[in-house]
């Protein structure tokens, strides 16, 4: 089906882009808590209408399930990340999972990990709009040194933060049949995230993080 791409922008730019995309054409649909009643994610998705990309975990959601690109806000943190950054991320994760539960999405956990369901269920007793507001306020906080994706608990702060220099100094690099802008210290950032990024992981470790039950694009059914 091709490659997976994500978009990440500093919070102010993220908010501006979201506002612009909400005014877009009927070909695309900007999906977030303000445009989709049963939306659960703490970041936005840009959906291609008249297509389908249904993830197995979220089959129960009554939302536009078109082919999508995830759009993440980058929020300020101290560099290197400290325990408060990790605590914020943990609380955001609990709130995110409690919103999932309010919409019928349950992650399967085994052993002692099942205990995590307890605080999530308690939080799920709160109104959804309160949880969304708490989640956003925990992400938006001033710090000095860099940025990170705080809203998505699947991203490790220790590996996926960006310094001011990495975001401000850019160079053009070849990518397939075109040139794209990248951080001037792209090699350093890639090594921090992936270690030896030129070596493929073992086959059983190659996972996009998404498992689909249905994919429809350009009228063709792939799954």
Image: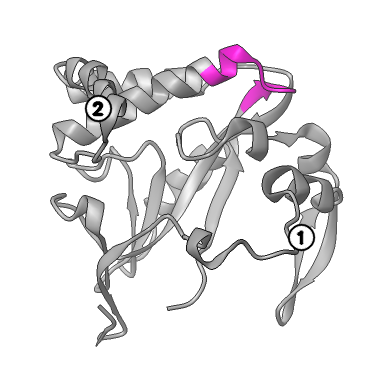
Pointer 1: what residue? Answer: 181
Q: Would you say residue 78 sits in the magenta stretch?
A: yes
Q: How crowded is mark 1: few (under 14 residues within 10 Å), some or many (20 or more)?
A: few
Q: Quadrant of residue 9?
A: top right
Q: How many labels does the image show?
A: 2
Residue that sits furthest to the top in the current view: 84
Asked which secondary structure carries label 2, the reply is: helix
Q: Would you say residue 104 sits in the magenta stretch?
A: no
**Residue 217 image offset from top left, x and y in percent:** 31, 80
Q: Earlier in the sequence, mark 1 or mark 2?
A: 2
Asked which secondary structure carries label 1, the reply is: strand
Q: Residues within 10 Å of mark 2 (few under 14, many from 20)?
A: few
Residue that sits furthest to the bottom in the current view: 220
Q: Which residue is drawn at 18% across and 32% down?
A: 101
For the residues carrying marks 1 and 2, which lies nearer the camera in this image?
2
Quadrant in which the N terminus appears: bottom left
Pointer 2: what residue? Answer: 114
Q: In which quarter of the image is residue 55?
A: bottom left
Q: Which residue is drawn at 24% across and 51% down?
A: 57
Q: What stretch is highlighted in magenta?
A: 76-86
**Residue 78 image offset from top left, x and y in percent:** 70, 19
Q: Along the horizontal axis of the image, is 206 left or right of 178?
A: left
Q: Along the horizontal axis of the image, is 122 left or right of 86?
A: left
In the displayed structure, would residue 174 be above or below residue 75? below
Q: Residue at x 57, y 46 (%)?
A: 8
Q: Residue at x 44, y 53 (%)?
A: 70
**Residue 176 image offset from top left, x and y in percent:** 70, 79
Q: Which mark is residue 111?
A: none
**Residue 118 image offset from top left, x and y in percent:** 21, 18
């Amino acid at each position: 089906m091709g490659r997976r791409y994500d978009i990440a922008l500093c919070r102010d730019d993220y908010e501006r882009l979201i506002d612009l995309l909400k005014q877009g054409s009927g070909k695309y649909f900007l999906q977030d808590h303000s445009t989709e009643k049963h939306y659960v994610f703490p970041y936005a998705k840009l959906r291609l209408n008249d297509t389908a990309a249904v993830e197995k975990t979220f089959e129960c959601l009554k939302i536009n399930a078109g082919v999508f690109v995830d759009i993440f806000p980058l929020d300020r943190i101290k560099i290197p990340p400290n325990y408060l950054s990790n605590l914020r991320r943990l609380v955001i994760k609990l709130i995110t999972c409690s919103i999932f539960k309010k919409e019928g999405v349950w992650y399967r956990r085994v052993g002692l990990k099942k205990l995590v369901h307890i605080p999530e269920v308690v939080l799920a007793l709160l109104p959804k709009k309160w949880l969304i507001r708490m989640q956003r306020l925990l992400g938006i906080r001033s710090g000095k040194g860099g940025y990170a994706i705080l809203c998505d608990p699947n991203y490790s702060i220790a590996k996926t933060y960006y310094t001011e220099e990495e975001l401000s100094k850019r160079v053009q690099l070849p990518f397939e049949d075109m040139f794209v802008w990248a951080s001037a210290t792209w090699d350093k950032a890639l090594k921090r995230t992936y270690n030896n990024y030129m070596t493929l992981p073992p086959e059983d470790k190659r996972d996009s993080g998404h498992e689909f039950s249905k994919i429809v694009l350009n009228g063709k059914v792939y799954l």
